[in-house]
Amino acid sequence: MKSKVKIWIEDNEGNLVFGGGKTQILELIDETGSISEASKRAGMNYKKAWSHIKILQEYIDDELVIVSKGRNSGGTKLTAKAKELVENFKILKKEVKEFNDKRFKELFENEEKMINCSKGKEND
C-alpha cells in the first residue's frame, strides 16, 4: 500500500490558481515555444491550454507568457517569473511527496500499526 497526495494552489476564496495541468502546459510551452504544440503534447485541445493561461493571467499579477504574433516569427515564451513559479511548484510537490512517503511509513508500515491488505497484492 501507499499514500498519495495531490497539490495545487488556491486563492483566498478557494479558486484553483495553479496546479499540475498549468505546470505541464507552461513546461511544454517553454520546451516548444508554441501554445498549439504544447497543447498537442499535453493531449489537450488548444482552447483548454489557453484557458489555463487566461486563468493564470487573471489571478497572478506578474506576466507569465509573452506571445509574439507572426506567421514565421511568432511564438510563445515564458517569463522568468513563470519559470520561477513552475520550479517552485515542482519543489513544493516533491517535498510534500517526500514528507507524505516518510510519514506514511512511520504511521502505517511498522509492526504495531501495519495494515494488511490482501486485495490487489499482485499489482503492488
Image (cartoon, rainbow, N blue to C red):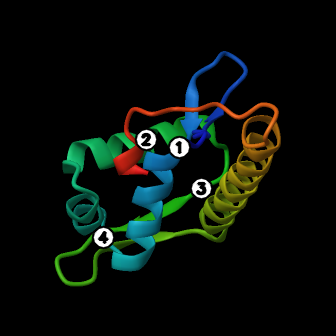
Circle nearer the N terminus (3, 1): 1
Which quadrant holds the N terminus?
A: top right
Circle nearer the N terminus (4, 2): 4
Label 3–label 1 contact, CB within 8 A: yes
**In the rendered image of this protein, does residue 107 appear above or below residue 45?**
above
In the picture, residue 81 is in which quadrant? bottom right
Label 4–label 2 contact, CB within 8 A: no
Q: Residue at x 57, y 23 (%)?
A: 15
Q: Secondary structure at mark 2?
A: helix
Q: Nearer the viewer, residue 113 or 56?
A: 113
Bin the neighbour count of mark 2 within 10 Å (Cα to Cα): few under 14, some 14-19, many 20 and up: few
Cα distance between the residues tagged 1 and 4: 17 Å
User: Outermost residue toward the bottom?
Assistant: 72
Q: Residue at x 67, y 44 (%)?
A: 61
User: Outermost residue toward the top?
Assistant: 13
Circle nearer the N terminus (3, 4): 4
The amino acid sitting under disc 2 is Lys
In the image, taking residue 102 as reference, residue 27 lies left or right, namely: left
Bin the neighbour count of mark 1 within 10 Å (Cα to Cα): few under 14, some 14-19, many 20 and up: some
In the image, taking residue 100 as reference, residue 49 lies left or right, namely: left
Label 2–label 1 contact, CB within 8 A: yes
* Residue marked by disc 1: 57
Q: Residue 63, labelled with which disc?
A: 3
* Residue marked by disc 2: 54
Cα distance between the residues tagged 4 and 2: 15 Å
Q: Residue 34, labelled with which disc?
A: 4
The amino acid sitting under disc 1 is Gln
Q: Nearer the viewer, residue 48 or 111?
A: 111
